[in-house]
Amino acid sequence: MNLFRSEEHVKAWPHYDPASEEGILPVTEWAEIFAGPLFRNRPEPDYLANQGKYYGAIFATLAATGKTGPFWAPPAR
């Protein structure tokens, strides 16, 4: 994953997958996603016990910013 490339550079990459186009975002949107508790709370001693609710928060952030397509769907278990 390379977060700091232009959209044009990403699309010119030989391994570019058009199915991942939804994931090409400005760094400000990535910062909002990474600012949530899933990433922010990793140093906490109860992180693993609370990880499930952290995932809920990240999917709520994604939905609030309109990222609801298949690219953003949680993996099937």
Image: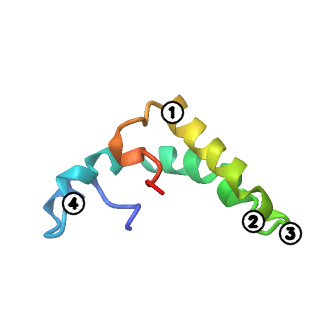
Q: Residue at x 18, y 57 (%)?
A: 11
Task: Give how far apart the Cα atoms at labels 1 and 4 are.
Answer: 27 Å
Q: Amino acid at mark 2?
A: Leu
Secondary structure under the numbered disc 1 in the rendered image? helix
Q: Determine if residue 25 is in view.
A: no
Q: On the image, which quarter does residue 43 sit in? A: bottom right
Residue 48: give its label: 2
Vertical comparison of 65 with 51: above or below: above
Tell me whether circle 3 and circle 2 mark residues in contact (CB < 8 Å).
no
Separation (CA) of disc 3 from disc 1:
28 Å
Residue 65 x, y percent position in the rendering:
49, 32
* Picture layout, residue 28 above or below residue 12: above
Give the spatial CA distance, label 1 vs label 2. 23 Å
Tell me the residue that label 4 is attached to: 9
Where's the N terminus, which quadrant? bottom left
Q: Amino acid at mark 3?
A: Pro
Q: Quadrant of residue 45?
A: bottom right
Q: Which residue is mark 3?
A: 45
**Residue appearing at x 41%, y 61% in the figure:** 3
Identify which residue is drawn at 39% across, 61% down: 4
Horizontal and vertical percent position of residue 52: 68, 53
In the picture shown, does residue 73 fall above or below 45? above
- Tag 4: residue type? His
- The crowd level at tag 2 (other Cα within 10 Å; few <14, some 14-19, many 20+) is few
Labels 2 and 4: the sequence-earlier one: 4
Q: CA distance from mark 3 to mark 2?
A: 8 Å
Whichever of callouts 1 and 2 sits on the residue coming sooner in the sequence is 2
Check if mark 3's residue and mark 1's residue have beta carbons within 8 Å: no
